[in-house]
């Protein structure tokens, strides 16, 4: 077997339970490569399956990529349940241990600074989706009814242009109101976070959710503040779910957004 080394994460302390965890392939157990008081947590992998050439060939196999990415994340989650870590990107592979040591050495200052920030913290994710039609029906109904009264007695031509103008203004109002709510939610929960980061808005094809995502934030939360954070999100869910806002909270995750 042509063997490579897959790096899952970097640690600055080690727990013996880590070595009872199997790697991505379910065959090889994790082990350490140490340099400058930092540890790369790794496992051996078959380069005949995980080489760059193989990866290029499997680049369009979405199911394979999803399966391997899930397996990779599950290993990292299991490690992170035991110790604080800096997670690595999916399929960070080196040909030998010297290259891993060089990677640690080249990034040792950055790793040390990152550990100062993340130790004792966890990442929580909050994504907000909005059903604009539902929000319009539930929150703008009175305004729509008042406008319909204005149209009474108007000619078809006048009514057409008035309606077009009203709908454009209404869309702007809805967007402003929705984002005011979202910003209020984010500001509220940011108050209990060590750090907050805005992430990329994901398309429906990625989320698998029929309504558009309008907000995607990561929060670095002290472990002792996690329950307070969850309580505040639960209150927001209760306050706004009937008006068309779907608030999705997940975590804790390894602190990818803050490394």
Image (cartoon, rainbow, N blue to C red):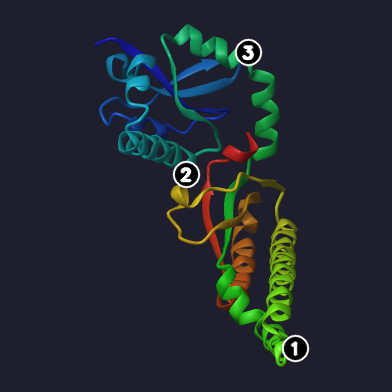
Q: Cα distance, mark 3 to mark 2? A: 27 Å
Nearer the observer, 72 or 148: 148
* Residue at the image position 45 percent from the left and 58 percent from the top: 209
Task: Identify the mark nearer the N-term, 1 or 3.
Answer: 3
Q: Quadrant of the N terminus?
A: top left
- At 59% from the left and 76% from the top, the residue drawn is 243
- The image position of residue 257, as x and y in percent, is 61, 40
Q: Nearer the viewer, mark 3 or mark 2?
A: 3
The residue that label 3 is drawn on is 106
**Cβ–Cβ below 8 Å for labels 2 and 1?**
no
Q: Nearer the viewer, mark 1 or mark 3?
A: 1
> Which secondary structure lies at badge 2?
loop
The percent position of residue 34, horizontal first and vertical second, equals 51, 17
Q: Earlier in the sequence, mark 3 or mark 2?
A: 2
> Which label sits on residue 66?
none
Q: Marks 1 and 3, how far apart in space?
A: 69 Å
In x, y percent, where is residue 174?
Answer: 69, 69
Tell me where residue 42 appears, x and y as whole percent: 42, 23
Q: Does dot 3 land on a helix, a strand or a loop?
A: helix
Mark 2, residue position: 81
**Measuring 72% from the left and 56% from the top, which residue is drawn there?**
190
Up the image or down, 56 lies above or below 84; here it is above
Q: Quadrant of residue 16?
A: top left
Q: Nearer the viewer, residue 108 or 19?
A: 108
Left or right placement of residue 250 versus residue 20 in this view: right
């Amino acid at each position: 077997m042509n063997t490579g080394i897959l790096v899952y994460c970097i640690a600055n302390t080690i727990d013996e339970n880590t070595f009872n965890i199997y790697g991505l392939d379910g065959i090889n157990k994790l082990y350490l490569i140490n340099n400058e008081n930092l540890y790369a947590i790794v496992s051996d992998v078959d380069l005949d399956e995980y080489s760059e050439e193989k990866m290029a060939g499997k680049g369009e196999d979405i199911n394979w990529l999803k399966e391997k990415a899930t397996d990779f994340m599950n290993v990292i989650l299991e490690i992170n349940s035991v110790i604080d870590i800096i997670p690595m990107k999916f399929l960070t592979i080196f040909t030998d241990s010297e290259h891993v040591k060089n990677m640690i050495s080249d990034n040792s200052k950055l790793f040390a600074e990152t550990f100062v920030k993340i130790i004792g913290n966890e990442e929580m994710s909050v994504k907000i989706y909005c059903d604009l039609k539902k929000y319009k029906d539930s929150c703008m109904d009175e305004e729509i009814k008042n406008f319909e009264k204005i149209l009474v007695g108007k000619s078809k031509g006048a009514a057409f242009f008035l309606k077009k103008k009203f709908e454009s203004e209404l869309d702007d109002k809805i967007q402003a109101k929705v984002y005011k709510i979202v910003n209020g939610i984010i500001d509220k929960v940011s108050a209990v976070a060590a750090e907050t980061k805005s992430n990329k808005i994901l398309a429906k094809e990625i989320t698998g959710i029929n309504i558009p995502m309008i907000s995607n934030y990561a929060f670095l939360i002290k472990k002792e503040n996690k329950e307070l954070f969850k309580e505040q999100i639960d209150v927001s869910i209760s306050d706004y779910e009937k008006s068309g806002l779907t608030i999705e909270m997940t975590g804790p995750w390894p602190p990818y957004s803050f490394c």
